[in-house]
Image (cartoon, rainbow, N blue to C red):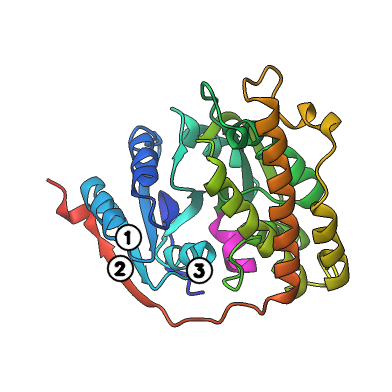
């Protein structure tokens, strides 16, 4: 990965996005009120798949963009944006993340003398959630535990320094998921200090059933491929154990475990929660087997185009 010349007194915010123009709009609007008092902010959007609607949002907000065609995954996209970043501190956010007022100033202060800051991300509470949304409210983003036990935070809210990137390089572009874990673990093994920001909290909208299952499948396959690539660092399940796990998943979940999987007082009907957990069990087991059996994706050549829309603003 090529590292550009650094520029002091600036922070770069990198947002990879794939066909999520509405989510990008949400995040850019929140960032507009985040300008730190003591430094400038440069937003870099990595448009993975070169979506026209994403380009329109970038032009409207006057931010820099790197367009990637065809889609190569979020870690490839982050690395291409990193090649454009020129600041000492780099912020990673996801499209769709709501950034509360004062968060960026608090995060830069919390980074302190550390080189890696994992920031708390929570799922926004909504009225009348679906089973998938209620489950995600209960289980998503235990960042403090991730950092304590596995030495990583999620790239939905992460700060790193230029010094760190020059030492350990960027993300593993071979991974479609699991790259947050691999990067954080690599940082820890290199001896860099990692820190945690509990508040203010970044917020992510809860997903409905199909997007939630699709992400679960992608993440499980990603972690399986991660284990195959780094067998000395991460547990690597065998094909036989993944196959028997799939067979066991055909059995329905135990009813007595249902309540503990959802927030107290949830309004979702018990049968809907039960059916959701059964489908989730099947989805995860199928993904584990696919991760063991499927060959790694072939690398596709990508066309990269850099666009600076800051000069287009009125």
Q: What stretch is highlighted in magenta?
A: 161-170
Earlier-in-chain disc, 2 versus 1: 1
Q: Residues within 10 Å of mark 1 (few under 14, many from 20)?
A: many
Q: Is mark 1 on a helix, strand or loop?
A: strand
* Viewer-side residue, 245 vs 168: 245
Query: Closer to the camera, 15 or 302?
Result: 302
Contact, mark 2 vs mark 1 (Cβ under 8 Å): yes
Tell me which label, 1 or 3, sits earlier in the chain.
1
Residue at (54, 37) in percent of width and height: 107
Choose the circle earlier in sequence order: 2 or 3.
3
Vertical placement of residue 73 versus 283, above or below:
below
Query: Do labels 2 and 3 touch, CB within 8 Å?
Result: no
Q: Distance between the residues labelled 2 and 1?
A: 6 Å
Residue labelled with disc 1 = 65
Q: Which mark is residue 76?
A: 3
Secondary element at image label 2: strand
Q: Nearer the viewer, residue 247 or 91?
A: 247
Q: Residue at 72% of width from left, 61% of height from top?
A: 286
């Amino acid at each position: 990965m090529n590292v550009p010349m650094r520029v002091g007194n600036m922070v770069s915010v990198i947002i990879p996005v794939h066909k999520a123009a509405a989510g990008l709009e949400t995040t850019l609007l929140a960032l507009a009120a985040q300008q730190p008092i003591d430094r400038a902010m440069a937003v870099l959007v990595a448009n993975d798949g070169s979506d026209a609607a994403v380009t329109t949002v970038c032009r409207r907000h006057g931010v820099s963009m790197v367009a990637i065609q065809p889609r190569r995954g979020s870690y490839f996209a982050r690395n291409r944006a990193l090649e454009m970043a020129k600041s000492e501190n780099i912020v990673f956010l996801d499209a769709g993340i709501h950034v509360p007022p004062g968060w960026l100033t608090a995060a830069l202060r919390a980074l302190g003398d550390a080189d890696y800051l994992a920031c708390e991300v929570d799922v926004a509470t909504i009225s009348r959630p679906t089973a998938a949304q209620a489950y995600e409210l209960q289980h998503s983003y235990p960042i403090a535990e991730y950092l304590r036990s596995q030495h990583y935070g999620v790239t939905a809210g992460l700060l790193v320094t230029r010094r760190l990137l020059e030492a350990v390089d960027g993300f593993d572009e071979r991974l479609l998921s699991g790259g947050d874990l691999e990067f954080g673990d690599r940082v820890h093994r290199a001896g860099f200090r990692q820190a945690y920001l509990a508040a203010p909290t970044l917020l992510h909208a809860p997903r409905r059933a199909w997007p939630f299952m699709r992400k679960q499948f992608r993440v499980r396959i990603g972690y399986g491929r991660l284990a195959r690539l780094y067998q000395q660092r991460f547990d690597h399940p065998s094909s036989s154990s993944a196959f028997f796990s799939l067979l066991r998943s055909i059995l329905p979940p135990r009813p007595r475990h249902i309540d503990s999987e959802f927030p107290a007082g949830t309004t979702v009907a018990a049968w809907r929660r039960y059916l959701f957990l059964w489908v989730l069990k099947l989805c995860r087991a199928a993904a584990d087997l696919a991760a063991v059996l499927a060959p790694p994706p072939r690398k596709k050549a990508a066309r990269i185009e850099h666009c600076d829309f800051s000069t287009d603003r009125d």
